[in-house]
Image: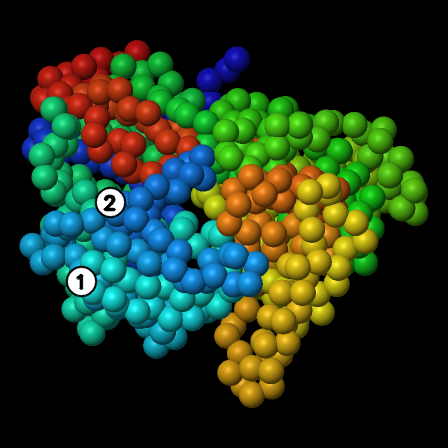
Amino acid sequence: MRPHPARFAALALLPALLLNSCSRREWPDDLLVLAVPTAARTLDPRLAVDAASTRIWRLVFAGLTTVAPSGEVHLALAESLTPTAWDRDGEPLAIVATLRPGLRFHDGRPVEADDVACTWRSAMDPRLGSPVAGELARRVRAVTRLDARRVRFDLHAPLATFASDLILGVVPRSACADPKLALREPIGAGAFAVVDAHDLAAVHLRRVGPAPTGAAKAVLIRAVSDETGRLLSVLAGGADLALGLSPLALQAAAGHRGARLERAPSIAWTYLGLNTRDPSLADPRVRRALSLAVDRPALIQALLDGRGRPAPSMFPSGHWVAPADLPPPPLDLAAAASLLDAAGLKADAGGVRLRLRLLVPPSRPRRREADALARALWAVGVQVTVRSLELGTLLAELRAGRFQAFLLSLPEPLEPDYLGWMFHSANRPGTAPPWPEPPQAAPPGLDCQPVVAAARAAWLHDAALEALGLATPRGAGNRTGVVDPLLDCLLEIGRRRADRSLRAHAYRAAIHRVGELVPVISLWHEDQVALVHPRVGPTTPVADGRLSAYVDATLAPRAAAISLGSEAP
């Protein structure tokens, strides 16, 4: 195979960069330098929703709980979570969180219940401007300090997913009184403290407490938007590790002594969203046909250099709700054509059955993926026009329903209630939620009547508040506009019932139901891949891309490591 020109361009510049990297800057041996594609927008955990900000604040702040890539919830700052009030069905309506003793913020102040309470109250207060304020307010009725170590959370309704909401990083109560203080001096109780974050494109952290033998005592997270710059910074020794590189950039670095690739399966989920309200896509047979026209393994090989897995659903194998009996949809062009025929979409003189507009973010990899999908769908007579939009504009178009299809990724679908966020009818943007209807039939072992009754009570409550102008903003994640009583029932059971086996049963049935309705075409889980300098010992990227996977790696002295990478291949 002929090498890509990018490889020659990178290697041609390498000798000069190597010499320049040694004279330009001398990093300490115990500093780990990470080159990432995007700068954080904020380090305040109450305000952060983007992946770049979230991955950094998780090093600095700690929540009452943490969530593993498998979706399992573990205690963090909390010593215990204890239900203290129940509804008439025996489901918890109040949770008391007890803090572990001896906790301290990075400045030495103790972490107390007042800090937890003020963190949550401020995050729910619209005046702070937290993007999750509305969602938290819909879930939590009150947050009360009981004593120095105990906080009580009163819920509006039973919420089995609440333990995973408690990952919200706790800030000192001084940052609640002065929100700008959290921006100027981000102080948490996590594994790393902030040394300098005035420029969020270069965040300098120091480790709190002893480091593992040979591991970094400090971390510098540098945002380098140009991926060639990230690649060359590792090859030249200016960075220890680079993330967010495209397959072409990784191919350019492959085999060079100045770096190695480390990869791991990921939970990041790439999908094609379809507007079920659009007349061209309202028939589920059409959406199913589009899914059958996509050769996922071939696209993963061509677009990701094989670094990924076909995705049967939002959740990869290993997640606690991933169905074991759900394979990825196969490539079946004949079946796709038959479904389009049955839906009345016959080919015109030019072979076109259907014309679609596909919206994508402006990144080059996403545009390549969209173009490849367009070529795949043309095999069954679907003509796709791809349009790139800045992410904010794209999301505004989706909220307004001005689209037919869109291509996006969900970086961390950890909590199975993401299914409710994306597919519950009450979360359709721009429309009032429908009156909850009972499904005609539910899977064995799942009773829809109680949850539909509870949903109707909530609907009446919200309608009354809306009439008074007091309604809490609803979720808007159901961009595809799908409405299905059975799916709503399954999602309500998974959200409300505390019994874990019952929740798993409901969520797996919901995943199968999404597969039948096809509001989205599930594509792939792209691997987490890091380009690592030789001075960094073995690392294991984690499925959700957390930076904690790299900060405990052993580090060799820089001078010796740079000499290892100075020989051209």
Residue 541 to residue 368: above or below: above
Q: Residue at x 36, y 74 (%)?
A: 125
Q: Amino acid at mark 1?
A: Ala
Q: In x, y percent, where is residue 485?
A: 73, 57
Residue bearing the label numbered 1: 148
Q: How far apart are the two marked residues, 2 and 1, measured between alpha carbons?
A: 25 Å
Colour mode of the rendering:
rainbow
How many neighbours does mark 1 have within 10 angstroms: few (below 14), some (14-19), or many (20 or more)? some
Residue designated by label 2: 59
Residue 394 or residue 238, whichever sits in front = 394
Give the quarter of the image for residue 22: top left
Foreground residue among 226 and 498: 498
Residues under numbered marks 2 and 1 in contact, where contact means CB atoms less than 8 Å apart? no
Assign the C terminus to one quadrant of the image.
Answer: top left
Task: Decide: is 552 above or below 492.
Answer: above
- Crowding around mark 2 (Cα neighbors within 10 Å: few <14, some 14 to 19, many 20+) is many
Q: Amino acid at mark 2?
A: Leu
Judge left or right: residue 87 versus residue 222. right
The residue lying at 35 percent from left, 21 percent from top is 261
Q: Quadrant of residue 545?
A: top left
Image position, residue 60 (x, y; %): 21, 49
Any part of residue 386 in sight: no
* Relative image position of residue 450 (x, y in whole percent): 66, 59
Q: Position of residue 328 (x, y in %)?
A: 66, 29
Q: Secondary structure at mark 2?
A: helix
Q: Residue at x 79, y 39 (%)?
A: 289
Q: How many marks?
A: 2
Q: Residue furthest bottom?
A: 468
